[in-house]
Image: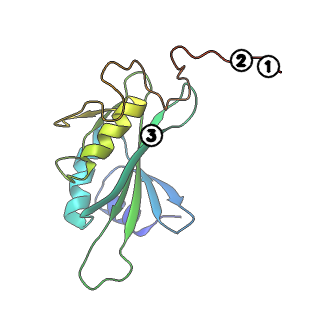
Amino acid sequence: MQGRLSAWLVKHGLIHRSLGFDYQGIETLQIKPEDWHSIAVILYVYGYNYLRSQCAYDVAPGGLLASVYHLTRIEYGIDQPEEVCIKVFAPRRNPRIPSVFWVWKSADFQERESYDMLGIFYDNHPRLKRILMPESWIGWPLRKDYIAPNFYEIQDAH
């Protein structure tokens, strides 16, 4: 089933994939990394003026990484603002996604955290550096294939 925003994007020839609706009825769309920056600007102009949150996750061991954006249309006098969830998937070997910092300034620390924990590079981000882990840390701790340094599993302990 196609949502309102998906129908609008199709009408204007903007490439995306509808992923349906979440449990709250919020439309979820998939956007390719190479299309994300231009579609982000279009969504901002269309009225999605608030980035509620940005997060990222490892889809499967050895698989894709996902960057997720929850956008809201904030308007005066509206009790139930329109929301949308955007997912941008990137390959594990070279996970590069355009930064939306220049569209929504609130993406700053959120994209930095996704970089720090999963190693997703946000192109054109002004301060893309570690925010939680020390700069000397090796690897990306929230990837499913991450092995903690100096970690020894105790087997057959009684």
- Is label 3 or label 2 in front? 2
Name the residue beneath numbered marker 1: 157
Rendered-image quadrant of the C terminus = top right
Q: CA distance from mark 3 to mark 2?
A: 32 Å
The secondary element bearing badge 1 is classed as: loop
Name the residue beneath numbered marker 2: 154
Q: CA distance from mark 1 to mark 2?
A: 6 Å
Direction bottom: furthest residue: 77
Q: Amino acid at mark 2?
A: Ile
Residue at image location 36% in from the left, 41% down from the top: 32
Direction front: furthest residue: 158
Name the residue beneath numbered marker 3: 66
The secondary element bearing badge 3 is classed as: strand
Residue 22 point in image, percent of width and height? 54, 61
Instruction: Decide which of tag 3 and tag 1 comes sooner along the chain.
Output: 3
Residue at image location 56% in from the left, 29% down from the top: 144
Q: Amino acid at mark 3?
A: Ala
